[in-house]
Image: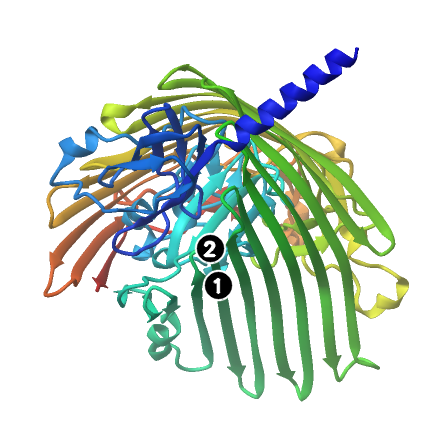
Amino acid sequence: MAFKKTFVLLFFLSSFTTYGQQVVIKGQVTEELSKQPLQGVKVSLSTPKKEGVTDKAGFYSFTIDPADSVEISFSLIGFTSVTKKVPATEDFSLDVVLSTEDYYLDEVVLEGQKQKKISEGAEISSIDLPVEQIKSIPTLFGEKDVLKALQLMPGVQTGSEGMAGLYVRGGGPGENLFLVDHAMVYNPYHLFGFFSSFNGDALQNVNLIKGGFPARYGSRLSSVINMELKSGNPERITGEAGIGLIASRFTLEGPIVKDKLTFMISGRRTYLDVLTRPFMTGDFRAGYYFYDLAGKISYKVDPKNTIYLSGYNGNDRFSISTQFEDNQSKGNLGWRNQAYTLGWDRIINKRVFSQTALTYSGYNFNIRSEDNWGGETFFLNFNSLVSEISVKQQFEYFHSDKHKLFAGISLTHHTLNPEALVFQGSYINSDLDFSSRTRALETAIFIEDEFRPFRALTINGGIRLSSFYVNGEHYINPEPRLTAGYQLKPDLSIKAGYAEMNQFAHQLTSGGIGMPIDLWVPATENVMPARSRQVTLGMAKDFMPLNTTFSIEGYYKKTDRMAGYREGASFILFDDPYNLEDGRSWEDNVTQGQGWSYGIEFLLHKKAGRFSGWAGYTLSWTQLQFDDVNWGRKFYARYDRRHDISLVGLFKASEKIHLSSTWVYGTGNAITMPNAAFQPFTPSEQSSRPTASYTSYYYYEDRNQFRMAPYHRLDLSIQFIKKLKGRKVRTWDLSVYNLYNRQNPYFYFLENTYSNTGNQTVLKQVSLFPIIPSITYNLKF
């Protein structure tokens, strides 16, 4: 027995000694011009044969046995490959800079390069969309839009004509986690949802996760949209500016202290208010504008420590005023988003990387009106706000080439004020001042392990433990996560994933299209947190000579305790402003239910080359059920869409001319329409009572039982590019939205027509955007 114990001890010590003799080769990969870190670079060792990819900070790491030297290669689509031979007798650090290739001049070279394969690893339902492709896609009024580009991906749908809201695998717009440098953005939309709040010129990376969520992400049910702002060029001042039909933008970046302290600032503003002002004469005036600002300051303390401060601020403002004789009325509606991050990235040692972030996020929606009618004055001020302060700490531990561990903790303090009303009027006895504010504490701790037991199999398993404390109620929910990928061939794999997600802040949606009047409310004793469980199974294929990938994924998602308005409720959460003392609150207007979403998605994607783009198709079903809605029966969600097709083509005809086009098709939204209309009076009664003919009653059988007409359109864009003196590049961008002038439905209404032969109720369609040409001037320097 003693011999066995001694043997086990010696074996353990031998293993420990052998592991201790290993060496670590690590470093960071950056881009030549911008000096920004490059994520997803494929890093390969020749002997021993090992492969990996850089993380979002551009870092890589290998653990190997000592050797005289080792050959290491770096490759990424669109960049020149680099191969280095380095000593491997002790720990070695190697930083590499990759330079870009001209796609249209050297296609053959690009086709011979290696790139990150989607068939490798355990990632599933995750899409990295190149920012340059986002900026090349034709869009409404020429405004390059991140969220509109994501809508063109399978499994992601738009809520309505022209809207930027994202509906991911059946989830609503409030179920998406928008992160900008770790800080959450609650309402990422401008112009009542027609544009997103993010200027693509300021972004470094855009990543969409639709399923198989890593344990490091939480707080939302349907997707994660992770965006990183540029840190700033550490060597020289560069910039980009654009002037369009309705908005202008600029971005400036560069060093404050070369290779040490950098900055980036980006801004955008519309001038709709200025353009329409000359036409606003007489007794009616209205105006609208939005702006957004983003910035980042990054300080490289030493090779192992970087501190940065980044921020985003967006504002929308709509105003209206009327005057009729001595009667006056004026009001405005606005909403504001804020997201700020103070971050610290640190390389603790050769195996451990740390990320620390202190963030603030805020969203405020406000309606103000003041009326003076017949000598009496009425004043209304309605507010809804949500804010949070969060501390996040995450560690990455490169144990070996077989194990990469992530662990972290976050602490978030929420303040939610769903409704705050001040109402003053000379005809009431006393002024009304009402507010409901809730404070809550959310915590989360997670651990995950990216494990590669052998070359063909990669597993990412983890668990997230989330907690929410509000008004004496304490919710604790475990969230297991598991994804796995098995390579059948070097370029073909099957993948699977399972994830549970919890959401403690509900977005109450009245119109189903992600409008600013969709309010945020917390989970309470009476309103439970929402939960989703999603299973995904797929196949991934790489066509390496063509720089093309193909994936097919099937998914099933079940959502419990999702929140919505009761029948007849809206964002004005009280029914009678004169009886606020009766104890009613926003909770009385909320009901909870469940949802089912399942489908299959196809994506063929070519990310670079003279011709690039993608083709996506989704076949899906989404149903909801609430006890207090539709008599408790299941019904199709408004955003249920049976078929969804997106075709995107980007063609570099020459160095001076680039072409792009998109074509989309989608099954019409499900809406509620009456099954029958009737008049309560006979024809003789109507003739004797003229006003009776204007009274109609409608019968509704089921919610969302009617389908709008299918949606489809074609957009085209052509860019004329000219290199100017120095490093300047001028681009004219001509685009056409809805080229063949498709009259897509925005909403329907019923119109009663009257004649001697009888009365008829006719369904009328309202379309929003006809064919719209636009022109944008861009200057890069």
Residue topped by disc 1: 308
List x then y, in percent, for residue 688.
66, 53
* Closer to us: 228 or 113: 113
The reply to whether dot 1 and dot 2 touch (C-beta < 8 Å) is no
List x then y, in percent, for residue 125.
49, 31
Rendering quarter of residue 103: top left
Give the quarter of the figure containing the C terminus.
bottom left
Does residue 625 lie above or below 764 as drawn?
above
Residue topped by disc 2: 304
Q: Does 370 sit left or right of 467 as displayed? A: left
Q: Which mark is residue 464?
A: none
Amino acid type at image mark 2: Lys
Q: Does 225 sit left or right of 530 as displayed? A: left
Q: Does 66 sit left or right of 681 as displayed? A: left
Instruction: Say which residue appears at 70% left-offset and 46% top-offset.
Output: 444
For mark 2, does the 10 Å Cα neighbourhood hold few (<14), some (14 to 19), or many (20 or more) residues? few
* Spatial CA span between label 1 and label 2: 14 Å
Does residue 368 lie above or below 766 as drawn?
below
* Closer to us: 615 or 258: 258
Does residue 18 lie above or below 89 as drawn?
above
* Closer to us: 660 or 673: 660
List x then y, in percent, for residue 232.
36, 62
Give the quarter of the figure containing the N terminus.
top right
* Closer to us: 439 or 239: 239
List x then y, in percent, for residue 215.
61, 38
Q: Mark 2 falls on what kind of element?
A: loop
Amino acid type at image mark 1: Tyr
